[in-house]
Image (spheres, grey):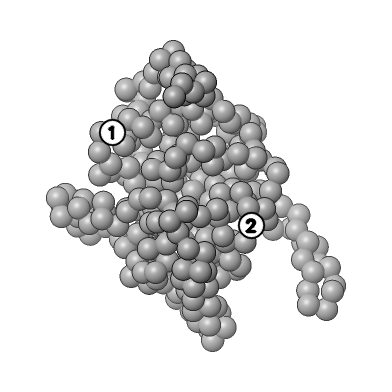
Amino acid sequence: MWSFSDWRRRRFLARHPLDAQLWAQVRRRLPILDGLNDDELRLLGERALLFLRDKHLSALPGVELDDLRRLLLATQAQLPLLHLPELNWYQGFHELVLYPDDFVSPQKHRDPAGVVHEFDDERAGETSLQGPVILAWPGVESGGGWDAYNLVIHELAHKLDMLNGDANGLPPLHRDMRVADWATAMQSAYDDMNRQLDRDPRAHTAIDPYAAENPAEFFAVTSEYFFTAPDLLHEAYPKVYEQLALFYRQDPLSRLKQLQREHPEYQETQAQ
């Protein structure tokens, strides 16, 4: 069946093909792409170009954007969607605002007694339901390794979460997934982290303790780990890894293990 959106997509890519030299530089900067096959890399590159067509990158003073940096950001943004059907997963926002460094975000919090507390919070990224995605550029550039950190994936996971409304750790699941299975896996791991931190706020948790802030942050942090430290996530919470593999339709752990078998430089890969 003929599709206008498919025709428009093909027409754009024919007019704006992926620059091979630029793509090679991006791949060198993003080790988490290692192990993807040629078809996956081609599709990822195309989707990164389409992301840049559809989203506006607003660079504040101090951030210099060139074609390489734009493609570097877009590729990280599209990696989680690589094996998902093209259903406009990043709908609801059109702009990414790029700060030269961490920024101050005014916050409000209502405590159990009903008292509202206002404070400034320094952040590397921020996402709201209808607003743009805000990213500190150093965080964008430092992502891409197998080191349990990726600011772009983290913030865009919040946008996936918000497809159902306010972020609550439950993105729209595929038809072959069960909400009960998702909730059981996520809640059990989330509760486990909070028990550890209740006993010792300085406890060395298996994944970043920021995941215990609330269910939305748990989903965003575990999404980061899924793509950048899948071995650590699977070892700590295999059921969470299983649900994320079903949601993202990917298996980064198998890819990492194959890299470790075949390449000496990966044999000692682990998050620091």
Q: Amino acid at mark 2?
A: Ala
- Image spot of residue 186 (x, y percent): 49, 69
- Image spot of residue 102 (x, y percent): 61, 49
Task: Using residue 260 as the reference point, say whether residue 106 is left or right of it.
Answer: right
Give the vertical position of 194 relative to 17 (above or below). below
Q: Residue at x 32, y 34 (%)?
A: 41
Task: Using residue 131 as the reference point, say whether residue 250 is left or right of it.
Answer: left
Depth check: 30 or 45 in front? 45
The quadrant of the image that shows the N terminus is top left
Q: Amino acid at mark 1?
A: Asp
Q: Residue under label 1, please give it.
A: 39
Depth check: 62 or 75 in front? 75
Give the vertical position of 81 relative to 16 (above or below). below
Quick one: label 2, few (<14), some, or many (20+) residues within 10 Å? many
Q: Residue at x 76, y 54 (%)?
A: 106
Disc 2 on helix, strand or loop?
A: loop
Disc 1 to disc 2, C-alpha distance: 33 Å
Which of marks 2 and 1 precedes in the sequence? 1
Residue 18 found in image quarter: top left
Q: Residue at x 47, y 53 (%)?
A: 175
- Image spot of residue 223 (x, y percent): 46, 56
Residue 206 found in image quarter: bottom left
Task: Using residue 123 as the reference point, say whether residue 16 is left or right of it.
Answer: left
Q: Residue under label 2, please give it.
A: 167
Residue 55 found in image quarter: top right
Depth check: 131 or 105 in front? 131
Disc 1 on helix, strand or loop?
A: helix
Q: Which residue is situated farthest in the top direction here? A: 15
